[in-house]
Image (cartoon, rainbow, N blue to C red):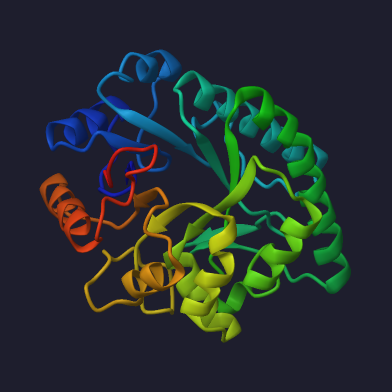
């Protein structure tokens, strides 16, 4: 699949989907980067014959904006977050999507943003533990919905720069291992974002490939993009990069994947997708989700 955020601009959802389909990109992860119509559900249902969808995180965006945080200490924010996720699970079922992914929680709600992302206040060990408890409780409360809708709930690993160290949940592979020991469920898994993991590996000084292998048993979906480890740059996967090497070493070639790199044109995106199909021994989405589109 390809993310709606792979191209720049501020198009309508319909315009981006038209461009993707015209380029032969018929698997789309719905998320950031497009303006949604009020009747987004009707629009998507009308396109299911031509396009296969997955929903990611803050989609469709609500009429009143907020920062989605399932670990929020603010009851209103947490309730809004739970409501959005439940709605996304329901829409995923309507679109016959097998999974929905949401970002891991933040210890505290953001106090601002810059070009790299959200800005967070300083937090202590006690705040981190109580936030983790709230996040666990939120996920546990969502699992009955996941089972009822027949949609897997995937948690995406946060991107953690040095400035954000300790301010996010589920930063390291060990944190994920502990999380799944507490919240084991057949409908629960990881959306492993390779670009996020690259930055976090630099911050915590763990080995990227080993981390991919540790998380592989829980990984149900991949986000494919690269960076130099300093920030989340969304560069295309490269032949010499560590992403392809880690995928092959961890045995993840059969796991569904979403291209989340940034491109100047839909033609260059489509060319990259074709290249990925070639360099991976077999189409990475062969099982259940057709192709890397």
Find the residue positioned furthest to the bottom.
Answer: 205
* Residue 276 found in image quarter: bottom left
Give x and y (percent) for residue 186. Answer: 67, 42
What residue is shown at x 52% (from left), y 37% (from top)?
99
How many badges with numbers are in the image?
0
User: Is residue 167 at least partly visible in the picture?
Assistant: no
Q: Nearer the viewer, residue 283 or 151?
A: 283
Note whether 237 is above or below 96 in the view shown.
below
Give x and y (percent) for residue 187. Answer: 64, 40
User: Is residue 24 at least partly visible in the picture?
Assistant: yes
Q: Which of 136 and 99 is in front in this view?
A: 99
Give x and y (percent) for residue 293. Answer: 26, 43
What residue is shown at x 42% (from left), y 60% (from top)?
252
Q: Is residue 204 left or right of residue 174?
A: left
Q: Nearer the viewer, residue 284 or 57?
A: 284
* Residue 64 found in image quarter: top right
Q: Quadrant of the N terminus?
A: top left
Give x and y (percent) for residue 162. Answer: 58, 79
Note whether 103 is above or below 234 in the view shown.
above
Note whether 1 is above or below 150 in the view shown.
below
Q: In this view, does 83 lie to the left or right of 127?
A: left
């Amino acid at each position: 699949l390809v993310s709606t955020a792979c191209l720049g601009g501020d198009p309508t959802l319909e315009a981006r989907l038209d461009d993707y389909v015209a380029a032969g990109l018929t698997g789309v992860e719905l998320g950031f980067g497009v303006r949604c119509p009020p009747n987004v559900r009707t629009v998507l249902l009308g396109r299911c014959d031509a396009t296969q969808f997955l929903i990611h995180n803050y989609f469709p965006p609500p009429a009143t904006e907020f920062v989605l945080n399932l670990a929020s200490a603010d009851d209103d924010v947490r309730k809004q977050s739970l409501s959005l996720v439940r709605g996304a699970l329901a829409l995923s079922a309507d679109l016959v999507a097998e999974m929905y992914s949401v970002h891991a929680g933040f210890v505290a709600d953001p106090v601002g943003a810059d070009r790299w992302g959200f800005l967070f206040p300083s937090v202590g060990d006690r705040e981190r533990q109580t936030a983790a408890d709230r996040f666990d409780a939120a996920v546990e409360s969502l699992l009955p919905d996941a089972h009822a809708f027949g949609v897997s709930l995937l948690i995406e690993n946060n991107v953690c720069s040095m400035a954000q160290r300790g301010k996010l949940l589920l930063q390291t592979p060990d944190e994920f291992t502990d999380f799944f020991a507490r919240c084991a469920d057949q409908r629960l898994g990881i959306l492993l974002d390779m670009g996020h993991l690259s930055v976090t590996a630099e911050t915590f000084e763990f080995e990227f490939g080993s981390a991919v292998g540790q998380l592989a048993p829980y990984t149900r979906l991949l986000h494919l993009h690269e960076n130099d480890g300093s920030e989340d740059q969304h560069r295309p996967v490269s032949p010499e990069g560590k992403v392809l090497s880690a995928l092959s070493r961890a045995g993840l070639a059969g796991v569904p994947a979403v291209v989340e790199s940034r491109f100047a044109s839909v033609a260059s995106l489509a060319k990259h997708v074709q290249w990925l199909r070639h360099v991976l021994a077999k189409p990475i989405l062969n099982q259940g989700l057709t192709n890397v589109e």
